[in-house]
Amino acid sequence: MSDPRAVSGDPHTRPISGLHLSILFGAAMLYVGVTLPFFPVFLAGQGLTDSQISIILTIPMLTRLVGNPVVTAIADRRSGLARTLAFSAVASMLLSAGLVFTQGFWPLALLVCLLALAQGPMLPLADALTLSEVRRRLDMGEKPLDYGRTRVWGSATVFAAMLLGGWTIGLLPTSGIAWLIAAASFAPIAPALLLARREGRHAPARGTHRPTRPLGRLRIIAVLVVSAGAVQASHAMYYSFASLHWQAKGLSSGFTGAAWALGVGAEIAFFLAAGRWFGGEAKARAFLFVGAAGSILRWLAMMADPSPPVLLALQTMHALTFAATHLGSVYLLASLAGSAHRAQAQGWLAASVSLGLAVATLVIGQVYADWGERTYGLMAGLAAIGFGGFAIVAKLTKPKQ
C-alpha cells in the first residue's frame, strides 16, 4: 500500500538522490577529517598549555550534549531537516573563518563553543534525512537506498583528509591549520542549500500536528541511546592516548598513520558490505551485539600491550566497534522514533556519545599516568555496560510470534 504522505507535501517523503546524500556526507565530514587530528596542533601553536588544550577539546563534547537535541527537535517540529542543516552549515562556515583571527584561551573557548552549536547537529540531521529517504523508498516500493553505502563517503572523506592534510600541513605554518579548517567548512554549504531549496517548496505549515511516542517506546529509545553512547565512548582511550603510547614505545609516525588508516579502512569496508552482505537494517539488533562484543574483546586485548602485528590486526576491529555499533543504533533508533521525531532521536544519540566521550576522556586523563595500557580495562567495562543495555533493547523490541 502506498504511503499517503508521499503525496501530501511532507518534505520527509520527497525523493532525494543517493548521490546527493553521499556528497552531503562527504562534504560534512571533511571538517571532521581536518579538525580531529590537526586542531590540537593548531591550539598548541597558539601557545596554549596542555590543560587549556584539554579544556577546549572537551568543550564541543559538552556543548553538543545540549545543543544537538535542541536543534534537532526544532528541525523536526518547526524548521525542517534540510533548512536547519543549511543554516548550521552556513553558521559553521562563518564561525570557522573566525579561527583565523582569534587568539587567546577565552576567545578560542567561546568560539569553539559556538562552533559546536553550529557544526554538531549537521551529521545527526544528515542521518535523519538519509534514513527518511530509506524509509520512503521502502514504503513506496522503489529501488532501495543503502544507508551504509551512502554514509561511507563520510568515512572515505575523513580517510583522505587525514592523509592529504598531514602532507599539506607539513608545508604550512601552524597558523595555516585555521585556514584549512575554514576551507573545509565551505564544503557542505552547496549540497545543504540545494536540499533546503527543495524542502522549502514542500514544507509543512508551522504547528502541523506530529504524532507523539508511546511512553514504553520512549523508554526503549532511552536505553538504546545510553547503551550506544557507552559503547562509542569506550573508544575514548584509543582516541586520546593510543598515538602517544605507540610513539612512547618507539613505533614510527609512519606506523601510527598506517594503524589509524587501517582502522578507518576497515570501517569503510563494513559500511560498504553491511547492506549487501550482512542484512542491513533487518540486522540492526545483531549489529549492536557484534559491536559491543567486539569492543569488549578489542579493549581487553589492548590491555596486554600487543606487538605491532597484533596491534594492526586489532585495528581492523574498528569495523565492529565503531561501524557496526553506529549502523545498528541509527537503524533501530530511526525505526523506533518514526518520521516525526527522527532527527531529534539522532540528536539524542549524538549527545549521548558526546557525553560519554567527555566523561571517559576526563577520567582517563586522571588515571592513565598510573595505569598505562591497563586503562583499556575501563573501556572494556563501558562496552560491557552497552552490551547489557542492548540485551534489554533486544528483549523489549523482539517481534511477536
Image (spheres, grey):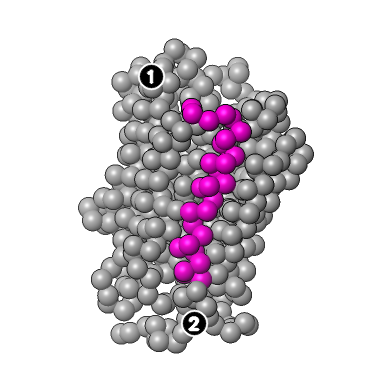
Q: Residue furthest right?
A: 106
Residue 286 horizontal/vertical position (percent): 34, 51
Q: Earlier in the sequence, mark 2 or mark 1?
A: 2
Q: Residue at x 67, y 25 (%)?
A: 50
Q: Residue at x 43, y 40 (%)?
A: 161
In this view of the protein, can residue 73 be seen by the observer? yes
- The relative height of residue 146 versus residue 295 in the rendered view (above or below) is below
User: Disc number at residue 306?
Assistant: 1
On-image quarter of the N terminus:
bottom left
Q: Main secondary structure of the magenta part?
A: helix
**Three-letter code for the amino acid on which mark 2 is drawn:** His
Residue 276 colored in magenta in the image: no
Residue 183 horizontal/vertical position (percent): 53, 47
Q: Which residues are magenta?
A: 170-196
In this view of the protein, can residue 220 be seen by the observer? no
- The relative height of residue 208 versus residue 23 in the rendered view (above or below) is below
The residue beneath circle 2 is 202
Task: Give the mark count.
Answer: 2
**Three-letter code for the amino acid on which mark 1 is drawn:** Pro
Image quarter of residue 174: top right
Residue 25 horizontal/vertical position (percent): 43, 55
Tags 2 and 1 touching, CB below 8 Å? no
On-image quarter of the C terminus:
bottom left
